[in-house]
Image: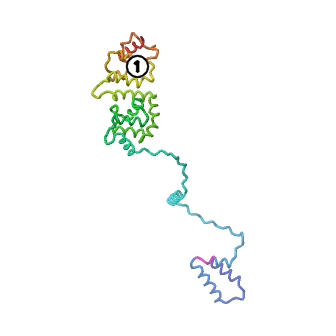
Amino acid sequence: MMFVLFMCLLIGTNPAVSDISTASETLDKLNHLDLNGQGSQKYTAQLVKPIKGSVMPVKKKRKLPDADDHERRCKITSFTRPQIRGARPINAEKPFSSKKCLGWFHEYAGTSEVVGPEAMEKFCEDIGVEPENIIMLVLAWHLEAANMGFFTKEEWLRGMTLLQCDCTPRLQSKLEYLRSELNDSVAFKNIYRYAFDFARDKDQRSLDMDTAKSMLALLLGRAWPLFPVFYQFLEHSKYKGMNKDQWYNVLEFSRTINTDLSNYDEDGACEYTNNPLTTWTYLAAAFLAK
């Protein structure tokens, strides 16, 4: 390249120029400009003017980024890019708080570890539910409460955590859900069976008949058309209490016997070998059939 530039310089000068020292000075100047890799192009451009359109510009090959460069570039891009967020609801529900739930418990229990009967009345008043309402039984089932009229701290925290309730408004918002569980046959059966141990005195193996009638009225009175007549049977029966098997079988009886008693077999009233119903429930059926 230097040789070409030198030839161009010689050709472009006056033929009379033969002074060797002048040519030497020119070469020295060119060499000096090229030492730093710069300036030669500028000087060359002054000496040789390119013909417009005669040379295709050469694109420099871009170095392909490796994986690290790409990852670094992506991180920077994602960091600097504005984050577009959806509109936040004004009344966004806050997450469940165990600390808040515990404080809610002590609003009724005070320094005690148990919400007792008096505090329970206040609790029912606050949530807008009568103590005798079946929803309180469903709530107790969720809390796995062992005794009627009492919620321990452990029962409260376990059940309310599952329900995700840490304050009165949240529990009020779940009341319809609790009521709807009574329409689920599996859930209702579990609630019904739970009610026996929940209602009985812990030193007794059976429910006294008055408690049994009250609980049956609460659980079956709203949905079993024959319950009023069945209740009369209990009123006139010789039984003073109801054991767990009898309690379970009342539900099966209410689900098995037709409203018109068309599936009642008087001849087999005392035969229960192939039937889940006990003898006394067949006696109830006989009473209903009168």
Residue at left offset 61%, top offset 84%? 29
- Percent position (x, y) of residue 217? 40, 23
> Is 86 drawn above or below residue 126 in the view shown?
below
Residue at left offset 61%, top offset 78%? 39
Task: Name the image quarter holding residue 4.
Answer: bottom right
| Crowdedness near tag 1: few (<14), some (14–19) or many (≥20) residues, C-alpha within 10 Å | some
Residue at left offset 39%, top offset 23%? 216
| Quarter of the image with the C terminus in it | top left
Q: Which residues are magenta?
A: 37-41
Dot 1 amino acid type:
Phe
Residue at left offset 71%, top offset 82%? 12
Query: Depth check: 26 or 168 in front?
Result: 168
Query: Depth check: 174 or 264 in front?
Result: 174
- Percent position (x, y) of residue 99? 38, 46
Query: Depth check: 218 or 95 in front?
Result: 218
Q: Secondary structure at mark 1?
A: helix
Query: Depth check: 185 or 36 in front?
Result: 185
Q: Is residue 122 magenta?
A: no
Using residue 176 as the reference point, say whether residue 103 is left or right of it.
left
